[in-house]
Amino acid sequence: MLKMRFPAVLFSLLCMLAIPLGSISYAQTSGGADAPPPRASDSQDSKNQDSKDQDEPTETLKVSVNVVQLFFNVKDKRGALIPNLTKNDFQILEDGKPQTIKYFTPESNLPLTLGILIDSSGSQINVLDMEKQVGGAFLSQIITDKDLAFVIDFNVNADLLQDFTNSVHLLKTALNSARINTGGGGGVIPGMGGGPIPTGPTGPKGTVLYDAIYLASHDELAQQVGRKAMIILTDGEDQGSQLKIQDAIEAAQKSDSIVYVLLCADRGFYGIGGYSGEGEMRKLSQETGGRVINVGNKADKLKEAFDQISNELRSQYNIGYTPTNTAKDGSFRKVEIRPNSKDYKIQARNGYYAMAPKD
């Protein structure tokens, strides 16, 4: 959990030294070769064992296994989700080299760690209330007792409105607390001690979108293991972030998070030129296995978009392999899940960073 504030100097250092999970180390279990590694938060469940289990001597053989784990959807040519496939329907390649699939499961009910990022800059004044209402209904639909979620809003600053919780009430309360801020506010994202995200060297802050994505990825989602996703409600415009879009994409990739972007905007606010953030958001979503859905200022389109995301997150396949390239050199490895049928379209992230496991 984030407790302290994020200083400008340390923020800059962490931008250079970010070390999220590129692979997963886990204890050997009796679940067989097709069983996925446990979720980090599952360790909390072990603390709730009966006292008799605590009294009995136990010996656990722990084996460090570097596993690349991917969650993905399969769709037909019309975009409909395809269920009930097996690992024999796929091949997996890393940097063009075939890999051996170690496990494969159609895991629609694995615990989900979810980040909701909501744009509360001036450009969202006509759509923010819609986002709160429809987003709250989505949280009621998607979050279960075994899931975790957090809420960040961003404008001239970025604020962690609610840290990890499975309480839909707390998440809705946080979402509803977002307020339009066009400057002069004191919002910060609690991180590791200090003031708000520093202003970039060129011009004033307006919408620190890229900084918010970085912090959601690096400070929140990178600390979790398992099925992770980020949903961003924004027009895609950034003004004043210290970081660039590529920094945000890299942080999201290192946190192994799927990113969905719901483009929410009242076109009348922008005048003749309109808004131009869609291209960068498409790059972010495509490289992380998510997608962009343009909803404008229509509540019914936003609800439909949330319904689509809910179906996709609850209909994911989980595939894992041990890479033949065992080097932990921090390089980016391109991964392709290739279906054996030309009628199938894969929606998955396009790779991972081969980082050394954390101690």
Image (cartoon, helix red, strand yellow):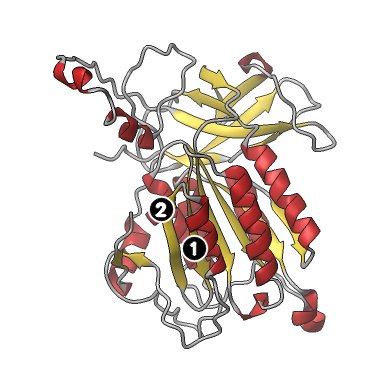
Per the image, the residue denoted by label 1 is 152
- In percent of width and height, residue 313 lies at 62, 39
Residue most extreme to the bottom? 184
Amino acid type, mark 1: Ile
> Around disc 2, counting alpha carbons within 10 Å, would you say few (fewer than 14), some (14 to 19), or many (20 or more)?
many
Residue most extreme to the right? 78
- In percent of width and height, residue 115 lies at 51, 53
**Residue 244 to residue 39: above or below:** below
Q: Earlier in the sequence, mark 1 or mark 2?
A: 1
Q: Residue visible at 70% across and 54% down?
A: 292
Per the image, the residue denoted by label 2 is 220
Q: Residue visible at 39% across and 77% down?
A: 198
Q: Is residue 84 visible?
A: yes
- State yes or no: discs 1 and 2 in contact (Cβ < 8 Å): no
Amino acid type, mark 2: Glu
> Around disc 1, counting alpha carbons within 10 Å, would you say few (fewer than 14), some (14 to 19), or many (20 or more)?
many
Q: Nearer the viewer, mark 1 or mark 2?
A: 1
Say which of 279 and 157 sits in front: 157
Q: Based on the displayed image, in which of its 4 quarters is residue 76 positioned?
A: top right
- In percent of width and height, residue 221 lies at 43, 49
Relative to 344, is 123 on the left or the right? left
Say which of 255 and 174 sits in front: 174
Relative to 296, is 310 on the left or the right? left
